Amino acid sequence: MSEPSNPAPPPVEAQAEAPASGTAAPAGDGTISKKAAKKAEAKAKKEAEKARRAAEQAAAQAAAAKAAEAEDLARDNYGQETHETKFSDDAIEVSLKNLGEEHVGKKIQLRAWIQNARMQGAKMAFVELREEGTWSIQGVVAASPEGTPVSRLMVKWVGAINPESFVVVEGTIEKPAVPVKSCRVSNYELHITKCFVHAAAPTVLGMTLAAANRPIANFSDEEPPVEQAVEKLSVAETTGTPAATMLTHLDNIVMHKRSYVQQAIADIRAEMKELYRSYLRAHGFKEFEPPCLIGAASEGGANVFRLPYFEKEAFLAQSPQFYKQIEIAGGRKRVYSAGPVFRAENSNTPRHMTEFTGLDLEMEIKKDYHEVLDVLEGVLLHIFRNISERCPDEIALVRSVYPCEEFLLPEPGKKVRLTFAEGQKLLREEGPEEFRNVSDDEDMSTPQEKALGAIIRKKYNTDFYVLDKYPESARPFYAKEDPINPKVTNAYDLFMRGQEICSGGQRIHDPVELEARIRKKGIDPASPGIKEYVDIFRQAGVPAHGGGGIGLDRVVAWYLNLPSVHLAAFYPRTPKRLLP
């Protein structure tokens, strides 16, 4: 059928519904008018031409970029590091902390992380290069007129490197016009001529270095556990920015480890352990290594981790207590150890961990058990009085993030020792109203200990003190009772800022007396582990002895007054955390 020569216009309703785009509108009988068809064809040609020009432009840009890359005389001076990457033979390797005037004008090679990168126009970029800890220097990469050794493409590439990528650079040390305040090495800068990415970081980090260096969310004893506080954030007073929770830190363990404050805490911890070892070695102690895997619960079966061991059951040691005593029974006069201790306590607080580092010692007693207490006080005072000299910068850095009052010590030659009963008396007389009814026969709660610590600080001007003669009911079966007053023991605790960091005392070395006290505690002397322990003292005569166990993590945390003991551990373990 042929199309009518003069078709009737569509009704008004049809016109209103006609497409407004370049699509040709159908005629009243469903066919497309010639005018609409021409209009649609013209628009299609226009769009096709536009697309063609855009494609040509993109192709031209790509060709230009490719040509520029092919002509880039600096192309061998940057990129991904490979086995073919070459550096100048006269470039020396030097650590940032050792940079001095003698290096100005010299060519050096540096391996570091990109802390920050920014472009300054098309011909210059600035980068902050960071080595271990807080050591950083500003790097400058600027295109030279001839395009070599640094080209515009190289500048653009370096300026786009993701933060926290690890790079190897070569350049010349120069003096900046003004000190670079953003870097620890402020009086020098590195003019980069070669830059290679050794290991690239992702575009988006799970936690930035800036966030990792802010205080973690701080929770009181009554607030939710740190690990569970995913949503609760505190605000860092100095920056006004939200602080990450401990959970966020541990989920981003690499950035947590890279933070200045965590590295400073780790360095302080290592020095404290070294001070502990050096003091004891100087006082005639020999180091030994107790086992972690044991065949019976080490202290009666409470709070112990059990695990299958071939066809038997094994346990993780709660303490090296028995093994320290075996060493003394075996002929050693003085021994110490430093190693992991495990407690299956379902305590989800910033003060507890299921694995921590114990610093333990044991020694023969010649006249009085206070000989042991003298050594424990001595080693801790040695740590406290020397750590500020060994780690002044690290301590200052930590306190810039976690401000606190200075840790007070007794005057040289003086000690603050109270009996447990005297401490309770202070609480009744000078403590908060809710602690006025404390008993001399029951152990203190954590709030009571902190309240007593505040009283002692005010009264004796010290944060470090001893409570002696703990009640019999608050001590384990191996603690020796006071021969004059059997309601108390020859046992003690040492405190920092009102929190216990060391527990110890004289042990029972007579097997008959030991078995009687075991029964008094309601334990069967023939039970696994206990029988083997008592038998040690039946095999041969064992001299009077005593010792103590120090929690390294708590010593570090309370000295620095950190909001969580987890910050003092390398990889904290809690009832809800086994990774990483």
Image: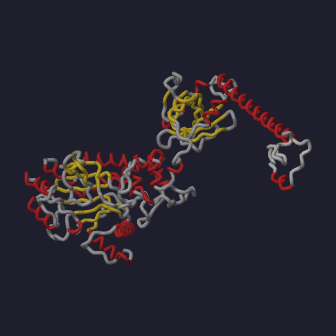
In the rendered image of this protein, does residue 348 appear above or below residue 338? below
Name the residue nearer the viewer: 502 or 154: 154
Outermost residue, front direction?
A: 1
Residue at image location 77% in from the left, 34% down from the top: 48
Task: Report x, y in % for residue 115.
Answer: 55, 41
User: Visible in this render: residue 464?
Assistant: no
Name the residue nearer the viewer: 3 or 320: 3
Residue at image location 43% in from the left, 59% down from the top: 228
Task: Report x, y in % for residue 54.
Answer: 75, 34
User: Visible in this render: residue 49?
Assistant: yes
In the rendered image of this protein, does residue 481 appear above or below residue 320? below
Task: Report x, y in % for residue 356.
Answer: 32, 53
Outermost residue, right direction?
A: 6
Name the residue nearer the viewer: 420 or 347: 347
* 364 on left or right of 229: left
Task: Report x, y in % for residue 247.
Answer: 45, 54
* 468 on left or right of 527: right
Question: Quadrant location of the N terminus?
Answer: top right
